[in-house]
Image (cartoon, rainbow, N blue to C red):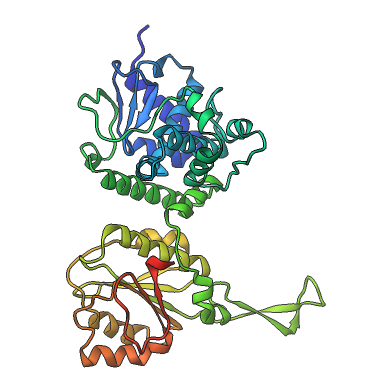
């Protein structure tokens, strides 16, 4: 009996969803095509998955692993990162092997069986034979550098199928699974990477909020939203007052578990307010990094309020935990005026312990008397994070994001 490719793919996605909902939900929202003229088993262009005629000859468990493998390539932006490596002189086979090591490692940690012969961390370490060692904490880029230094001759001799491809096929083939509507015709590499990442964050955060916290997904989310700044150090003053943990050690009440150690005293948590510049001068990558910094603050603290501003200010968004990052919705994208944000700050959050301002500091009303008066008033509580211009000199605690 001839196989119905579309029904078979939907069955496979269902099986993946039962085993690992995050991966299954991601695949449900991903365009999957079948073209019997394609010799490859499967590959991705960084957003969509393309299956060749060999795919449906595989046993069911391998089909599950292959689809999961390609989805992880997309989530981890391996196409975009491979292109960045190629611009530095890395052959495509190097970035492909490095990406496969990370994809198969993640797939295994998610509980899936890796097909026999698939490139793994153990396989690469066997090639190395003590020259060096790939570890699970290495990034795709670190593995690629190691391969270039130690294994180029071995890698070139290895018959590796390239399953990370740029561009878009003229004849993509038959649609087996319809993904998000706005994804089908995206061709720009940066746009594909941004869309793939946004979808991953939405799905992982939603499942984390629902109580599912698989370790592999947490690692991916931390990589996607990795903050550049050391927020434990930067917000030390607030943390010392019990922010986040809401407790401090006290000798007035010995520990109930260990009588020779101090006990815990609950403290009232203070607010951290983040003024986040979302104006048109802040590009998409920097907006994403700003969100990553808020994510980093949320790992250290609770009671965070985000005030997004451009030519005006938008309603405060409360962030109590890292998963609340999904509440940040970028609107506006107009010019940059900070006065309305400072007015809202003084009305609602005048007693905030720390005030973080994420901006390029190309702010039109920065020299106005009212703005200067407010900034000077809060100067000793402000952490000014800049991506471009230097904040006013009376704000002493400033950090340049791109230099970190």
In the image: residue 299, left or right of residue 122: left
- Which quadrant would residue 175 be assigned to in this image? top left
Asked if 311 appears above or below 65 in the picture, the reply is below
Q: Nearer the viewer, residue 111 or 75?
A: 75
In the image: residue 212, left or right of residue 52: right
Question: Whole-percent x and y of residue 269?
Answer: 52, 79
Q: Quadrant of the N terminus?
A: top left
Question: Whole-percent x and y of residue 348?
Answer: 34, 83
Q: Nearer the viewer, residue 238 or 40?
A: 40
Asked if 253 appears above or below 327 in the picture, the reply is below
- Which quadrant would residue 48 be assigned to in this image? top left
Which residue does the image show at 52% across and 34% down from the upper left?
Answer: 104
- Which quadrant would residue 253 be assigned to in this image? bottom right
Question: Whole-percent x and y of residue 63?
Answer: 45, 23
Which residue does the image show at 55% across and 23% down from the upper left?
Answer: 117
Which residue does the image show at 29% across and 61% down from the upper left?
Answer: 329
Asked if 364 appears above or below 334 in the picture, the reply is below
Camera sees residue 61: yes
Query: Most extreme residue toward the top, as rendered?
Result: 1
Question: Whole-percent x and y of residue 308?
Answer: 29, 71
Q: Nearer the viewer, residue 21 or 337?
A: 337
The number of numbered discs placed on residues in the rendered structure image is 0
Camera sees residue 301: no
Which residue does the image show at 37% across and 29% down from the upper left?
Answer: 43
Q: Quadrant of the C terminus?
A: bottom left
In the image: residue 284, left or right of residue 225: left
């Amino acid at each position: 009996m001839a196989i119905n490719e579309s029904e078979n793919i939907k069955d496979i996605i269902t099986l993946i969803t039962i085993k690992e909902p995050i991966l299954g939900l991601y695949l449900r929202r991903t365009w999957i095509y079948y073209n019997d003229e394609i010799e490859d088993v499967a590959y991705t262009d960084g957003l969509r998955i393309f299956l060749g005629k060999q795919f449906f000859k595989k046993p069911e468990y391998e089909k599950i692993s292959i689809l999961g493998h390609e989805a992880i390539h997309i989530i981890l932006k391996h196409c975009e990162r491979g292109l960045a490596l190629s611009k530095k002189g890395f052959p495509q086979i190097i970035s492909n092997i490095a990406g496969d090591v990370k994809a198969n490692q993640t797939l295994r940690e998610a509980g899936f069986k890796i097909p026999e012969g698939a490139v793994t961390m153990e396989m690469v370490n066997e090639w190395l034979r003590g020259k060096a060692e790939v570890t699970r904490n290495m990034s795709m880029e670190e593995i690629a550098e190691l391969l270039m230094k130690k294994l180029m001759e071995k890698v070139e001799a290895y018959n590796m199928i390239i399953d990370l491809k740029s561009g878009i096929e003229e004849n993509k083939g038959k649609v087996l699974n319809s993904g998000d509507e706005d994804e089908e015709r995206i061709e720009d590499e940066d746009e594909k990477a941004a869309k793939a990442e946004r979808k991953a964050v939405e799905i992982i955060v939603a499942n984390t909020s629902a109580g599912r916290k698989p370790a592999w997904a947490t690692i991916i989310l931390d990589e996607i939203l990795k903050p550049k700044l050391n927020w434990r150090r930067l917000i030390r003053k607030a943390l010392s007052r019990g922010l986040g943990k809401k407790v401090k050690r006290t000798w007035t009440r010995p520990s109930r578990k260990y009588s020779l150690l101090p006990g815990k005293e609950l403290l009232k948590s203070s607010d951290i307010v983040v003024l986040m510049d979302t104006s048109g001068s802040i590009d998409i990558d920097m907006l994403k990094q700003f969100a990553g910094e808020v994510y980093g603050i949320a790992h250290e603290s609770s009671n965070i309020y985000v005030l997004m501003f451009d030519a005006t200010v938008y309603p405060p968004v409360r962030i109590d935990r890292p998963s609340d990052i999904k509440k940040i919705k970028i609107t506006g994208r107009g010019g940059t005026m900070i006065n309305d944000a400072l007015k809202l700050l003084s009305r609602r959050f005048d007693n905030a312990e720390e005030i973080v301002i994420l901006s390029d500091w190309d702010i039109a009303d920065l020299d106005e008397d009212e703005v200067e008066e407010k900034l000077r008033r809060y100067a000793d509580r402000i952490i000014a994070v800049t991506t471009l211009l230097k904040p006013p000199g009376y704000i002493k605690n400033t950090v340049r994001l791109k230099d970190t």
